[in-house]
Image: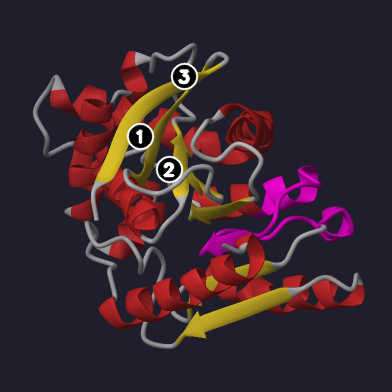
Amino acid sequence: MAIATDWVRYGEHLGYLAWPERAASPIPAVLVIQELWGVDAHIQDVTRRLAAAGYAALAPDLYAQSGQRPEVLSAERIAEVQVFLNSLPAAAWSDAAARQAALAEIPQPARSRIEESHGALFGQLGRLERWVPVLAAAARHLREGCPVSRGRKVASVGFCMGGALSALLACSDPDLAGAAIFYGSAPSAERVAAIRCPVIGFYGAKDQRLVAGLPAFTEAMSKAGKSFEPHVYEEAGHAFFNDTRPSYEVRAARNSFVRLMEFFGRTLGT
C-alpha cells in the first residue's frame, strides 16, 4: 500500500502524520503517543504501520517547542543516550551508581552530553500532565482540522510513557473513541470515573512494576463501570513491542498488534 507521510504543524505543535495515499478521505484516525525517546524511527514506523492498516495516524512530537526541539532533547542526543543505556544490564537502568560507573568509562565531551540528556529525558516522567493539552489539541486537529480525517473518530495508542499518556488522555478527552496502553502506568483511581471510552492494555509479565499495579487499575475500571481489556504476556518484559530494543519479544508484539487492530476496528468503525 502506498503510504503518504509528512511533518505537519497544528497550532504551535509539530507531528509526524501518515495516511494511506489512495484511501478516500476522510478516514478514522489514531493518535500515536511516543515513548520517552520521542518520535524516533520506531514510533514513525508504528505510525506508518497504522496508516497501512487504513487509518490516518499522527505522532505528536512532545519535545518540540513551537516546532523546534531544544538541543538537549535533539534526536541525535537522545540516540546517544539510547546506545549508552542499551549497553548496560537492564538492572543498571535504575541503578544510579552503576550508570555513573559506566559513564566514567566514556571520554569527554560525550560523557557530559549523555549525562545531561539522560537527566532531561527521565525528568519528563514526573511531568506527564503537562502534555495532556498537547495531545488533546492533536486529537482535536485530527477530528476538526486534518483533511484526511476531519469529522471521523479518533483513538489513541501509547507506549511506555506514551501508554500512561494514552490513559490520561482518555480521562481528559470525552470525545476519544478508544485508548490503547502499551506498558504504561495507570491513572489514579479518582481519574478513572472520567473515562468515557473503551480501554485496552498490553503488559509483559516480567515488567513487575507495572504488572503489580494492574489488579488495582482493573478493579477501579470495573467498579466505575468502564470497559477495560488487559492482556499480559508471560514471556515478555517492558517495551516488548519496540523492535529496535533488546527487550523486543516477537510473539507478544505480533499478538498484541492483532488485538490492537481488532480494538480499533470495534471503536473506530470503517
- The 10 Å Cα crowd at callout 2, few under 14, some 14 to 19, many 20 or more, is some
Q: Quadrant of the C terminus?
A: bottom right
Tell me residue 94's x, y (percent).
41, 54
Whole-angstrom CA distance, mark 2 to mark 3, is: 21 Å
Q: Earlier in the sequence, mark 1 or mark 3?
A: 3
Look at the numbered disc 3 and give the secondary structure of its residue.
Answer: strand
Pick whichever, 231 or 9, lies toward us.
9
Residue 125: image quadrant is top right
Magenta-colored stretch includes residue 194: yes
Residue flagged by tag 2: what amino acid is it? Leu
Q: What is the magenta range?
A: 167-195
Q: Residue at x 17, y 54 (%)?
A: 87
Colour mode of the rendering = secondary structure
Q: Residue furthest bottom?
A: 234
Which residue is the site of mark 2? 36
Q: Which residue is mark 3?
A: 9
Q: What amino acid is found at the position of numbered circle 3 in the picture?
A: Arg
Q: Earlier in the sequence, mark 2 or mark 3?
A: 3
Q: Which residue is pictured at 42% across the width and 23% down the height?
A: 8
Q: Is residue 242 above or below residue 13?
A: below
